[in-house]
Amino acid sequence: MSTEEDHTVLRRVKSIPTDTQDLNEWDFVNAEKERQSPQWLSDSMWDSVDVVRKLKPRIQCCTNFVSMEVVESGLLAMGCDCVHTHEPLDPLFFFNTHTAIHCNIGTLTHLSLLGITEAVSHAREHGVKWILDPIAVTITDWRVDAVMDLLELHPDAITMNATETKMLAIMCNCCDNSILRDSTPSAVLTAARKVSIKLNAVVVTLDSDVGIVTDGVTSLHIRGAAQLAFAMKTVGAGRTLISSIITSFVACRPNNILLACAHAVSFLTVCFETISKRSRKPLWCSRLRTAMIDEIYSSSKKTALAKPKIRDMHWTTQDNSQGVTGCAEQLNELVAN
């Protein structure tokens, strides 16, 4: 794609429509141009940030009480309208033009599971996207059964760490137990890809040694996301904050969930790298949480001290072993560097 064409596409963000049909026509994602210009994946991230801030989506959060304050602070900083409810008798199921449901199973109870199931079922009837964060999915058999039931409601995206990605691949009969013995990033990518194809959902895997987003065919590596995931482990509800921001991007970019998820993770990575460069000493725990929320609110292309880095690793076909091997080797090389 030529420079002139690229600038023409990016300039369209200045007049973002609020009507869904107009937004679909305006949407600047073009798969053919995307393949011609890999750098466009990263350069267009700030356009997605502007979309979220202008459309101000309403996010219904089904999470535990410990996470609510952090999640709401992050979503409000992003400009979103946040609603916390998963009570099955609560009629607060608001769905407007730009809406999505963020579901973190957290401290799961029978009552909360019933509320989550009803909220998601209602959302599917209205074509509303929903994101599942199956944290600690394998701790108990009951949580495994609960997540398997939720998967039948077809989440549009799933956010997990490396171990959960492998375990979900085994639960869905995509991989055998031997994948647990493979600690390489390529094993995580293979599991994520197979889960994505099986469930027809975008898989986001963030852990201390890998940061990938895949729809099973196209896999994106976000440089710096692994460092973000590692640091956010020290923050109470840090992971839930990440998945809630991903939900806000999906709400505004429902026609390209893969790119929405990649841009959300990349944006948070840029925020993390920016505050790390500004700070004179390492940020951990509550200081990191506060700094991240502040940066989510104020970060812009002009003020950020880091650049988005999204690497497109194309799979030739879903079943082409040579393509899979090449992509896995690519990821191992990216992580090593």
Image (cartoon, rainbow, N blue to C red):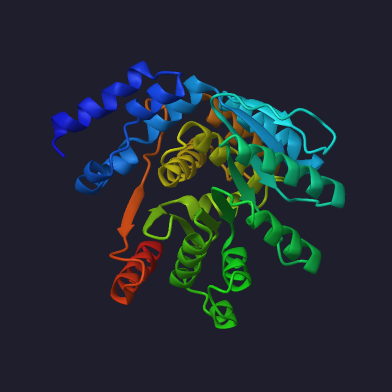
Q: Position of residue 58 (x, y in %)?
A: 61, 27
Left or right: 120, with 208 as reference point: right
Q: Position of residue 30 (x, y in %)?
A: 28, 39
Looking at the rendering, in which quadrant would you find the N terminus?
top left
Q: From the viewer's perspective, is residue 79 above or below residue 329? A: above
Q: Is residue 155 left or right of residue 60?
A: left
Q: Nearer the viewer, residue 70 or 247?
A: 247
**Residue sitting at x 14%, y 29%:** 4
Q: Position of residue 35 (x, y in %)?
A: 24, 49
In-front residue for pair 318/55: 318
Residue most extreme to the front: 125
Residue at coordinates 37% horizontally, 70% vertically from top-left?
Answer: 328
Determine the image quadrant of residue 216. bottom left
Q: How many marks?
A: 0
Where the C terminus falls, by quadrant? Answer: bottom left
Locate residue 144 relative to residue 216 in the image: left or right.
Answer: right
Position of residue 50 relative to residue 273, above or below, is above
Q: Residue at x 45, y 24 (%)?
A: 20
> Which residue is located at x 59 percent, y 81 percent?
177
Q: Where on the picture, by quarter, is residue 214? A: bottom left
User: Does residue 329 show up?
Assistant: yes
Q: Is residue 24 above or below residue 148?
A: above
| Image location of residue 76, percent across then percent down | 63, 25
Instruction: From this view, report whether residue 49 is shown above or below residue 190.
Output: above
**Residue 63 visible in the current orientation:** no
